[in-house]
Image (tube, rainbow, N blue to C red):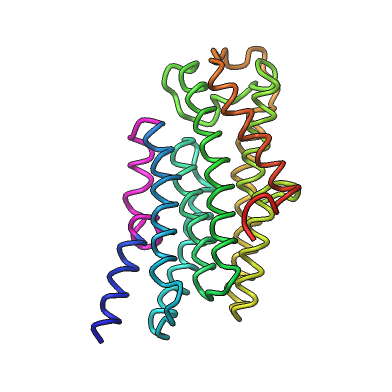
Amino acid sequence: MLMLLGLFFTIVGVAFKVAAVPFHFWSPDVYEGAPTLVTAFMSTVVKTAAFAGFYRLIEYMHLPDAVQTMLVVVTVCTLFLGNIVALRQTQFKRLMAYSSIAHTGFLLIIFLGISERTSGVLYYYLTTYSIATVGLFVVLTLAKRAANGDENIRIFRGLFRSAPWLAIATMLLLLSLAGIPLTAGFVAKYRVFALGIEAGYVGVTAFAVVMALVGIYYYVMVIREAFTPSERGPQLVVAPVNWLVISFCGVAVVLLGLMPGLIGA
């Protein structure tokens, strides 16, 4: 009984850290209100540390049925809320907050059945997700500065006209988060779905696939803004370090999609 109680509170703590439903309430407001670099840190480093720590804790543990059932419910609710609410967002940071919640749902599928491939899939997903997210927040920093602090997705309108390479990199990063083939995000989601099916959670996995398809819309919504013709796109001042980071992230999500064996199992 004490072990079950301990596991329950541990999962609650991790769920709060990674913004899983119903412990997600803080995420959208904090993402929107925090400085962009802090938001990027929370959505990558904090999430990675929380999931890695949770995996190490339960790696060799057989989860009781009650805990497993709770994980399933949290996973399904997180996938649903993250993707559905993201469809209505027009502020980029809030969109990324709900996107992060949705990705938490996909990551939770990994924990429904621990196997020898779990660690490789987990770290591959976290790495590729973090690369895409960091790149997008750097792009946001540049676009926000050019738009005098505005964070509406319309600040990306005409980006292809004013900075073609930046628009293409942004598109690649968003497509990776959406899980489109030939990107690292596709491989990450495919591996997660394969683990879910192997663990016997076919229904949960099928639901996750549907939610992944739904999620494509809000990523494409931003891409559409970037490639919408405009007389004058955002006038960005791109420092060399920003250019390097965005270029690295854009190339990495494609390279890791074509050669996933570079990291993970």
Quadrant of res 28: top left
The residue drawn where x is 42% and y is 86% is: 65
Q: Quadrant of residue 214?
A: bottom right
Q: Residue at x 34, y 68 (%)?
A: 11
The x and y percentages for residue 121 are 59, 61
Q: Quadrant of the N terminus?
A: bottom left
User: Left or right: where does residue 247 sit relative to residue 3?
Assistant: right
* Membership of 23 in magenta stretch: yes
Which stretch did the figure color magenta? 16-36
Task: Look at the image and tell me in which quarter the C terminus lies.
Answer: bottom right
Residue 154 location (% of width, % of height):
55, 27
In this rendering, the answer to whether 214 lies above or below 219 is below
Please tell me whether residue 55 is drawn above or below residue 177 in the rendered image: below
Quarter holding residue 161: top right
Decide: is 29 above or below 188.
above
Task: Give how far across and how far down residue 228 sits, in percent.
Answer: 69, 26
Judging depth in this view, the residue of 49 and 75 nearest the camera is 49
Furthest residue to the left? 2
Q: Residue sitting at 59 percent across and 54 percent down?
A: 124
